[in-house]
Image: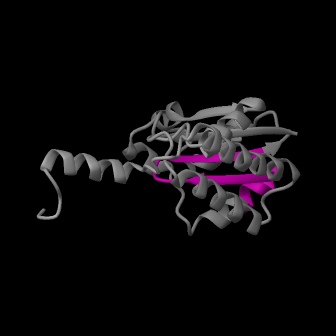
Amino acid sequence: MKIAALGISHKTAPARVREKVSVKSSRLPALLGELAGEFGEAVLLSTCNRTEVYVSCLRQDVKERLTKALLNGSHRNKELRSRLYFYSGVEAAEHLFRVASSLDSMVVGETQILGQVKEAYRTALEQNATGGHLNRLFQHSFRVAKRVRSETGIGRGNYSVSSLACRLAEEKLGGLSDK
């Protein structure tokens, strides 16, 4: 089996482009079912800063098939296609570890992403879209994220994009209580 990941994030596309690929929660069960049916195992992570699909399969055309599934008929759109990234094998696993550990976040060390990764995995489990390969990969990613946080202190500040924006606004405006 081969692990593969295809996605778009704040590093590769502005919000207006990412919105075109975002997966609404109402569409998630059906899309997970389609992905699992085609690839065998699938987890879909969709947040405000990224949309990523992780699969385990033997297909040679995995990148093209994932692109078509993720872009939902817009797969011919060159702008969207040029913003996607694709990893396979060890690179896909390493990417998930960086994401879960918030090393690939807009604000490195932010605390929300690990919860979002866990929720995406839980949803895939509930939809019977995962199997042995992705189960092991995601469980390992949670251990890696915990280790990164505990050994580096990266999450010590518990920052998020919104908390940093509020802090900056307070500094620039001299407080927010009267605003």
Q: Is residue 76 left or right of residue 65?
A: left
- Colouring rule applied to residues: one colour
Residue 56 image position (x, y, % from top left): 80, 44
Residue 53 image position (x, y, % from top left): 66, 47
Does residue 67 show up?
A: no
Question: What is the magenta range?
Answer: 33-55
Which one is nearer the viewer's eye here, 118 or 128? Answer: 118
Residue 19 image position (x, y, % from top left): 43, 51
Q: Is residue 62 left or right of residue 14?
A: right
Residue 50 falls inside the magenta stretch: yes
- Residue at x 63%, y 61% (from the top left corner): 119
22 in relation to 81, above or below: below
Q: Is residue 91 left or right of residue 160?
A: right
24 in relation to 87, above or below: below
Residue 4 image position (x, y, % from top left): 74, 38
Which one is nearer the viewer's eye here, 15 or 34? Answer: 15
How many marks on residues? 0
Does residue 92 show up?
A: yes
Which one is nearer the viewer's eye here, 93 or 131? Answer: 93
Quadrant in which the C terminus appears = bottom left
Residue 98 falls inside the magenta stretch: no
81 in relation to 145, above or below: above
Residue 89, by quadrant, is: top right
- Residue at x 50%, y 33% (from the top left corner): 83
Quadrant in which the N terminus appears = top right
- Residue at x 20%, y 51% (from the top left corner): 170
Residue 125, by quadrant, is: bottom right
